[in-house]
Image (cartoon, grey):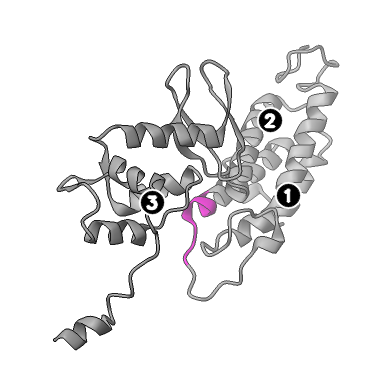
Amino acid sequence: MNCQNCRTMTEEGCSLCETCEMRLAGTLLRLARDVTPLHDSLDATLHPGGHSPVRIQTATPPTPIRLDVLDLIDMLDATARELWRCLDGIDALDWRKDPRMEDLEATLIACAGHPKLATFADAGLYMHIINNLARKVDLALDPPEQRREIGTCELCEIMLTAGPNDQWVTCPVCGREQRAQTVKLRRLKTLCWDDGRRGSAAEIAKAFTDAGIALKRNTVNVWRKRGKLDVTPDGIAYSSVYRLVISGEPVDELPCEKTKPSDELDK
């Protein structure tokens, strides 16, 4: 008989091989360990990363609930109890014959140590379901790092993405490895050399700062008010800001507009 998961030969009467049985049991135990972090993550004020208790922030009631995590807990609870009924030979749809009253964590641990875990008929199916749930739990507790577009590949012009701490990026098409800072500078160069590319003060300041050239939005607004930038209804020209930056234009900001002491005296 072949294993329902990896298709290798198994002992007579077994639906899973020993390796897959251990993997399924380990996944169930890992899910049991994740039950408490999942319940903690119901609070929408928690910092992402439920596997790291130091990241948890104290909630201030009333706190919103993450409905996606609540649905995930319900799916995990229903699957664990259904698996236990199958292992004990109880009809999965007849809840009246289920004598167990333990919580979700205890049910998962009981399933992991059940003697029929590798011998019941649908072991391969439940292994696939449990693995999918484990991946969803990992994503809920430890979301992937936020990545954003930084510019195009030098060879194939495919848009590249990178995280805030990435030093190098690899093009998914041509496989070329490039420095993230170089990609950002090349994108800024494209924006600044095209007189038709325009944007708001915030967009321009962000593009320059991402490329390693510190520029504040307020500085761009000061230059605009002084009439030093090419401004149209579509926005400020990147090229005009670039010319001021490379010319060494002072980037000191004007006094706060709320006070305007000199204007008040003139009146």
Count of picture labels: 3
The amino acid marked with disc number 2 is: Met
Q: Residues under labels 3 and 1: Cα distance?
A: 48 Å
Residue placed at 78% from the left, 13% from the top? 8
Where disc 1 sits, the SS reads helix
- 76 lies left or right of 192: right
Q: Position of residue 100 (x, y in %)?
A: 71, 53
Of tags 3 and 1, the one toward the viewer is 3
Residue labelled with disc 1: 32
Give neighbour class at mark 3: few <14, some 14-19, many 20+ (Cα, 10 Å). Answer: many
Q: Earlier in the sequence, mark 1 or mark 2?
A: 1
Residue labelled with disc 2: 127
Q: Is residue 65 part of the magenta span, yes or no?
A: yes
Is disc 1 in contact with disc 2, using a CB cutoff of under 8 Å? no
Q: Residues under labels 1 and 2: Cα distance?
A: 15 Å
Is any part of residue 94 visible from this angle?
no
Where disc 3 sits, the SS reads helix
The amino acid marked with disc number 1 is: Ala
Please name whichever residue, 48 or 199, is drawn nearer the observer in this view of the structure.
199
| As drawn, 162 above or below 52 | above
Rendered image: mark on residue 205:
3
Is any part of residue 115 visible from this angle?
yes
